Amino acid sequence: MRLTVFWQRMADHFGPGHSDTFARDHVMAELGGRTVNEALEAGWDTKDVWRVVCDVMNVPGERR
């Protein structure tokens, strides 16, 4: 998944302003105790990060 697609999906689900805040501030054990931004900076694949976000935040199947 391209990074631009990832950020578009985040914005579509959380809203443009909240997606940035969520990615910066929400620490998830499933990402090794990292935020979305930290996981991406650490080299996690965007598809894997999106799957974690979907699982943790109960993103509906049609948005996954």
Image (cartoon, rainbow, N blue to C red):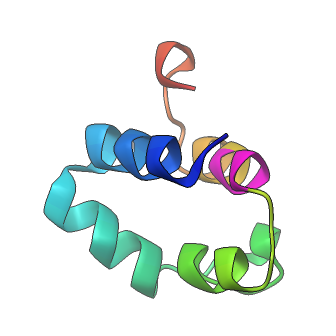
Q: Residue 42 lies in what quarter of the image?
A: bottom right
Where residue 48 appears, as percent x and y from the top left, is 78, 51
Quadrant occupied by the N terminus: top right
Where residue 62 appears, as percent x and y from the top left, is 50, 13
18 vs 37, left or right, is: left
In this rendered view, identify the residue nearer to me: 1 or 33: 1
The residue sitting at 58% across, 73% down in the picture is: 36
Residue 49 part of the magenta segment: yes
Where residue 39 appears, as percent x and y from the top left, is 71, 78
26 vs 16, left or right, is: right
In this rendered view, identify the residue nearer to me: 7 or 18: 7
Q: Residue 30 lies in what quarter of the image?
A: bottom right
Magenta segment, prevailing SS (helix, strand or loop)? helix
Residue 10 part of the magenta segment: no
In this rendered view, identify the residue nearer to me: 49 or 33: 49
The residue sitting at 70% across, 57% down in the picture is: 49
The residue sitting at 31% across, 71% down in the picture is: 20
Where residue 34 appears, as percent x and y from the top left, is 69, 85
Count of numbered marks: 0
46 vs 44, left or right, is: left
Q: Is residue 39 above or below residue 38?
A: above
Stretch in magenta: 46-50
The residue sitting at 54% across, 38% down in the picture is: 58
Check the image and name the residue furthest to the top: 62
In this rendered view, identify the residue nearer to me: 35 or 43: 43
Quadrant occupied by the C terminus: top right
